[in-house]
Amino acid sequence: MATSEITDDLPPEFAGRVSAATLKDGRALIVFDAAGLGEAERAAIERDITARLSARSDVNDVRVVMTAERKAPTLIAIGSGKGGVGKSTLTANLAIALARQGIRTGLVDADVYGPSQQVIFDAEDAKPDARDNRMIPVETKFGVRMLSMGQLVAPGRAIAWRGPMVGNALAQMIDAHWDAEDVILIDLPPGTGDVQLTMVQKYKPAGAILVSTPQDLALIDAARAGQFFDAAAVPVIGLVENMAGYACPHCGEVSDPFGKGGVEAAAQRLELPFLGRIPLDLAIRQGSDAGEPPAAGDSAQAEPFLSIAGKLAAWISARS
Ligand SMILES: Nc1ncnc2c1ncn2[C@@H]1O[C@H](COP(=O)(O)OP(=O)(O)OP(=O)(O)O)[C@@H](O)[C@H]1O
């Protein structure tokens, strides 16, 4: 659906103030520059836009974002000491869970070595547009807009990038048109490399969440990543244990292939909050691979993500 078709339904005097108008899967998003307008006038315009667009048969949800007094979105980094521990899975599901709690959430996939968010979000073919030389995040069907390293380069090429290119790509994604978001989750590559350095030097996140499996080695690396954020004065919001407790789909018996409780014990030792435990569950992997992240549904697999998102939301609201 062409953008001009939704703006056609708005009064002509709004034209100069509408900085973005998109319609995807029935969800209309209008970003309105409300500079200089009073509270009552802004509210009246918001009501007017909502009423006009809701009247369309192809619209079932309208979001109007007034931009004049917007603060920059809160950046939250999701990191891990080593790869493959479920950082991307956690980031995607947390973003969706936050959005379900009414927090306008975006996602930046900065995992240069293995960007995977387009797959999880079922947005593999989406390519971001640009306006005023800045990228426009891609809409997804989960109410979370996103940008990914995987959208900037051909598959498999990113791994050859060197520091400055990585920093540049990160800058493009963070400086994009995040006009509609209050919070942006950043899926970092594992470890403490170029992306993390650029992040803390140029785009210091408000806080970081670290994810680890309960294995000793993963935990040692997670502690190291924690020290890195600590040294950069980025508060660690807490630790998440992933892939703990495997429930056999056949007999239901719960076993602990990587041990259990190690992350909670490590959090205690490091004097960091423990945010929750996500079981090793085939349905989580299958949902991610199929572009159906569990946090978007109401299955038991959604529950740990919703609970951790609730703690993150509380942390964010306590600091603002
Ligand atoms: N709790 C879980 N239960 C089952 N499978 C999981 C779970 N968490 C993650 N996975 C699966 O494990 C694999 C690795 O997860 P993911 O890509 O999220 O890890 P990562 O830490 O981001 O890895 P990388 O750093 O390599 O990108 C994926 O196939 C994912 O679907």
Image (spheres, helix red, strand yellow):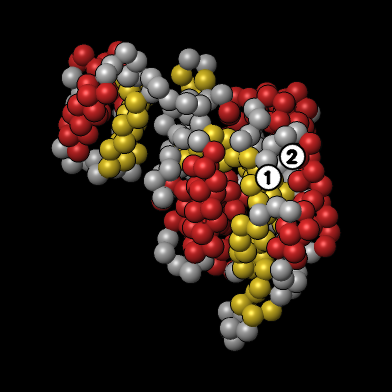
Q: Is residue 49 above or below residue 88?
A: above
Does 9 sit above or below residue 25?
Answer: above
Using the image, tell me which numbered label, if any, was put on residue 229.
Answer: 2
Q: Residue at x 72, y 34 (%)?
A: 233
Q: Are marks 2 and 1 in contact (CB under 8 Å)?
A: yes
Residue beneath the point at 82% across and 47% down? 224
State the image coordinates of residue 186 (x, y, percent, origin top left): 61, 39
> Considering only vertical position in the picture, is 172 above or below 213?
above
Asked if 269 appears above or below 185 in the picture, the reply is: below
Q: Quadrant of the N terminus?
A: top left
Q: Residue at x 75, y 69 (%)?
A: 258
133 sits left or right of 263 in the view: left
Q: Amino acid at mark 1?
A: Val
Name the residue nearer the viewer: 133 or 75: 75
**Seen from this angle, which residue lies furthest bottom?**
251
Task: Residue under label 1, please give it.
Answer: 236
- Within 10 Å of disc 1 (Cα), the crowding (few <14, some 14-19, many 20+) is many
Query: Label for residue 308?
Result: none
Amino acid at dot 2:
Phe
Distance from the alpha carbon under mark 2 to that under mark 1: 7 Å
Would you say residue 14 is visible in this rendering?
yes
Question: What residue do we see at 66% from left, 61% from top?
Answer: 242
Element carrying mark 2: helix
x then y, percent, for residue 24: 34, 39
Viewer-nearest residue: 107 or 58: 107
In the image, the residue with mark 2 has its CB under 8 Å from the nearest atom of ligand 1: no
Point out residue 221 in the picture as x, y percentages from the top left corner: 81, 51
Q: Inspect this view and state whether residue 124 appears.
A: no
Image quadrant in which you'd find residue 283: bottom right
